[in-house]
Image (tube, rainbow, N blue to C red):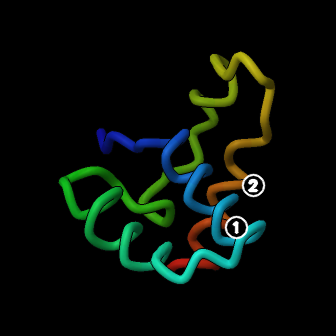
Amino acid sequence: MQQFLIPDLFKLYNNFVLYHDRNAKYYYDNVITGTGHGKASDCVYCGSCEIVCPQQLNILQLLRKVAETFE
């Protein structure tokens, strides 16, 4: 089972969208996912993360957006 740094993936995506962070792609490839953690596209969309999400986010949809943006 792949481990994802979901809060970090979303923070990076938000910084890219809101502030046009030019370093976001580098951080996605080398810092967030380059440390052995899964890329957003590695998600198998089982939905277990949404069940336990304290903010009730649509994590699966958001992970697709992250993958589209950085991969």
17, above or below 43, in the image: below
Q: How far apart are marks 1 and 2 (CA)?
A: 7 Å
The one of 38 and 70 positioned closer to us in this rendering: 70
Q: How many labels does the image show?
A: 2
**In the image, residue 26 lies at what x, y percent?**
37, 77
**In the image, residue 52 lies at what x, y percent?**
63, 17
**In the image, residue 43 lies at what x, y percent?**
48, 53
13, above or below 2, in the image: below
Q: Which mark is residue 31?
A: none
In the rendered structure, the answer to whether residue 35 lies left or right of residue 5 reads left
Residue carrying label 2: 61
Tell me the quarter of the picture where residue 56 sits: top right
**Mark 2 Cα shell of 10 Å, populated few (<14), some (14-19), many (≥20):** few
Name the kind of residue labelled 1 in the image.
Lys
**In the image, residue 60 lies at what x, y percent?**
68, 49
Name the kind of residue labelled 2 in the image.
Gln
Q: Which mark is residue 65?
A: 1
The one of 2 and 30 positioned closer to us in this rendering: 30
Identity of the residue drawn at 29% across and 39% down = 1
Name the element at disc 2.
Answer: helix
In the rendered structure, the answer to whether residue 57 lies left or right of residue 52 reads right
Name the element at disc 1.
Answer: helix
* Labels 1 and 2 touching (C-beta < 8 A): yes
69, above or below 15, in the image: below
